[in-house]
Image: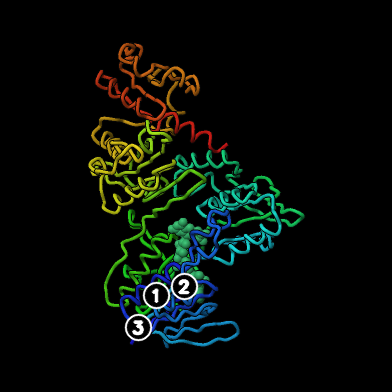
Amino acid sequence: MSRIIIIGGVAGGATAAARLRRLDERAEIIMFERGEHISFANCGLPYHIGGMIPDREKLLLQTPESFSRRFNIDVRIQSEVLSIDRETKEVSVKNKQTIYTEGYDKLVLSPGGAPVRPPVDGIDSERVFTLRNIADMDLIKAYIKSNHPQSAAVIGGGFIGIEMAENLQEAGLDVSIIELSDQLLAPLDMDMACDVHHHLRQKGVSLYLNNGLKSITERRSLTVELSNGTLETSMVILAIGVKPESQLAKDAGLSINTRGGVIVDRHMRTSDPNIYAVGDAVEVTDFVTGQPVMIPLAGPANKQARIAADNICGIPSEYAGTQGSAVIKIFDMTAAATGVNEKTAKRLNLNYDKVFSWNSGYAGYYPGSKFMSIKVIFEKGSGKILGGQIVGFDGVDKRCDVLAAAIRAEMTAFDLTRLELCYAPPYSSAKDPVNMAGYMIENVLTRKAKNFHWHDVDALPRDGSVNLLDVRSSQEAAQGYMDGFINIPLDSLRERIEELERGKPVYTICHSGMRSYVAARILSQNGFDVYNLSGGYRLYNAVTTCRD
Ligand code: FAD
């Protein structure tokens, strides 16, 4: 009978334990968890703070007793593993005041990642919080209940920071987000995060971009000194990322990368064949680029845990990499991303191109339909889909999931055009936004469309050497005039085509890039060399005003 020890009892740890038991009824399985709770819903924590999940118990998916009963696992909470002796195959464990050792045949590490706490003055104030577990959530909830804070400053505009901002706002506080870079939500590119900036501001959340935390001073309120100004607030939430909890692995001499990630092979095995590691603490391979990366997400942690358990039980399953599929609710908005973004594609010098589209989530004539902004990164030539980002309202998640599946299946844009997706007016359009993205890329690859982008607009010559054409209606053009562009509404273009100077390229725009594409087709078939603004004036305007 083999003896398996698991360190960490939440996402990866509990999944590994359950899978191990399902595969091997006779193994002795001990799961150590430092905290009081196991298998809780970390991802749901912000929503209890905001009141969306009023019942705290709903977050406790399993208790040590229920887990133990169902899976016959020896669950030991409040038990911190202090060290691993790989020679004797023993771990030493601290439970309250007692320290003891336990032997193992196989060991699974799923210690997760700890919130980063920058070493600045005032960081240890009792009014500065992080959110990782039930205890952290209880502290924040209790603080709000007994102190009635007016305001909160969230440091870090990533997924957890934005979820906390929304939920604190829902709990009645005035919220500010402080972010070091010039955009929120790093998995998105700036041109996709811009709609998130606008939406948060519209909901009353203040954004301090390009701003780092310098210090916190405790007075009646907290004075938060930023690299660019100061802010008075009642409480601070630190959400600037997580750091792998890999000290244990490091002390045991396991291979670790420079960011502290435990290095594992495709079987989730560490540099010691008897020790597996999974979850936020491990380095993974980026599915698209093949690069080593750290991507702390629940889905990958669960998959890796199952694979580690399989391998311990003799099933040689393999982890094929992480593509970073992620989604977030921002009040009534949704943002989602999968695969590589443009920042990464640029950094790695990939041979990529991009399209932007602006589609209705479902049939425009069905009440309540709203638009979503889509960006797809694809490989030049082959049209292979490398990444997708979507920001909008209904149906964002499912479109991003289709792109995620397309990336996994190594599909091209031509494949996207062929996907037969579910359609009825309340859900989609006969040409689904994913099909539309495929068509747009196909048009680029087959040279039916040549695009230019929002970042090219300001540099276009205004000296008459090119035609700058706006095909929106005159009312639309009056609302947001673009410097140097002449307005010929699309429906008059054929009659007024001679107003354009032949022999000079045409740069054409409309609201979303759709009518200007039609214009481009008319003009190119009339002998013009035409470039279409992908994403249109809407995207240009959203990006150029979102850092204000
Ligand atoms: P964890 O789930 O963090 O579990 C690690 C456990 O190990 C901890 O409980 C810790 O106490 C214990 N431990 C560490 N060291 C020891 C030791 N020496 N001895 C004993 N026990 C130890 N991901 C998504 O994909 N979508 C989301 O919407 C999402 N939302 C999130 C919201 C919040 C607020 C948080 C905190 C995370 C969220 N995540 C989300 C991330 C997701 O929860 C993690 O990726 C996932 O939990 C990682 O699993 P893990 O097993 O590696 O670590």
Q: Is residue 281 visible?
A: no
Q: Mark 2 points at which residue?
A: 9
In the image shown, does 459 or 433 lie closer to the viewer?
433
Helix, strand or loop at mark 1: helix
Residue at 28%, 34% in the rendered image: 444
Earlier along the polypeptide chain: callout 3 or callout 1? 1
The quarter of the image holding the C terminus is: top right
Residue 17 marker? 1
Between 417 and 64, the one lying in front of the other is: 64
On the picture, is 82 further left or further right than 386?
A: right
Tag of residue 27: 3
**Is residue 402 rendered to the left or right of residue 482?**
left
* SS class, disc 2: loop
* Residue 57 pos. (x, y %): 53, 65
Name the image quarter holding residue 525. top left
Marks 2 and 1, the one that precedes in the sequence: 2
User: Is residue 28 among what the camera can see?
Assistant: yes
**Against 463, is 119 above or below?**
below
Name the residue type under label 3: Ala
Identified at 46% across, 70% down, the residue is 62
Q: Does the residue labelled 3 lie within 8 Å of ligand 1?
A: no
Separation (CA) of disc 3 from disc 1 = 10 Å
Query: Dot 1 surroundings within 10 Å: few (below 14), some, or many (20 or more)?
Result: many
Q: Toward the viewer: 364 or 315? A: 364
| Position of 346 relative to 135 (above/below) | above
Question: Is disc 2's CB within 8 Å of ligand 1?
Answer: yes
Q: In which quarter of the image is the N terminus?
A: bottom left
Colour treatment of the image: rainbow
* Residue 544 placement (x, y as % from top left): 51, 33
The residue drawn where x is 33% and y is 84% is 26
